[in-house]
Image (cartoon, rainbow, N blue to C red):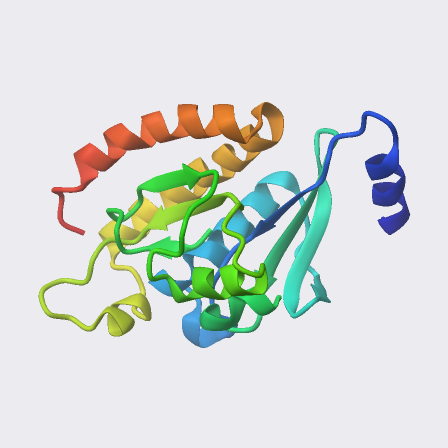
Amino acid sequence: MHSVIARRCFCTGAPRPWLFVGLGNPGDKYRGTRHNVGFEMIDAFAESQGIPMSTVHCKAMFGQGFVGDVPVFLAKPQTYMNLSGESFHDDMDLPCGVLRLQPKGGHGSHNGLKSVIYHFRGNREFARLRIGIGRPPGQMDPKAFLLQKFNQTARERIDVALQEGADALKLVLSKGLTESTRCFNMEQKYKHIRLQTLPT
């Protein structure tokens, strides 16, 4: 498969490859927690495109394939969230199940993104798909909240968001980042307004 990608990537006029990285923590202890929605996003996209996530490469679970003619690489770093830069992240600032596609930006106090930016030597010029997980209730410790599994209502919202996110990634591959961001975020804006006042 490597030779096919190499030939298709370096031919004149061939589409440029994309790398999608989902942030999370490895291990069964973290499966299904708010902290791992980035991993779940990669899994949902990989499944929708028939891309196996079966290789370990550069401290990450790795998959590769094509979406149409576009080469796609998928990664789930196995270095734990706060060290993700060594190798679609959760976001408490968005209501649970709301997504936001951004062409660039800062870390927003997200330790995984801080690590990525650090390992990119300070470069913040990479797109990200933010996946809303909501805020902790009351005075709950944010770290404890991140490591909890979703309740039924929140799980349903996240499952819908994962499918919407997989569709957004397909849109990025076909329409490009600028057009995809404009269209996708407009749809999510109305979802944000609707969900921000509902309990999870």
How many marks on residues? Answer: 0
x 46%, y 55%: residue: 38
Query: Quick one: 34 or 182, which is closer to the camera?
Result: 182
- Residue 144 x/y as whole percent: 26, 74
Please indicate whether residue 71 sits to the left or right of residue 26 in the image: right
Residue 116, position as x, y percentages in the image:
52, 61
Would residue 146 be found to the left or right of residue 72 on screen?
left
Give the residue furthest to the front. 122
Question: Where 127 falls versus 135 (above or below)?
Answer: above
Q: Residue at x 33, y 26 (%)?
A: 187
Would you place residue 80 above or below residue 159 in this image? below
Q: Position of residue 102 (x, y in %)?
A: 43, 39
Q: Residue at x 55, y 31 (%)?
A: 172
Q: Is residue 156 visible?
A: yes
Task: Say whether residue 33 is visible.
Answer: no
Residue ID at (52%, 64%): 118
Q: Position of residue 155 (x, y in %)?
A: 31, 52
Eyeballing the image, is 36 above or below 8? below
Q: Which quadrant of the view contains residue 18?
A: top right
Q: Is residue 186 left or right of residue 1?
A: left
Front one among 63 and 80: 80
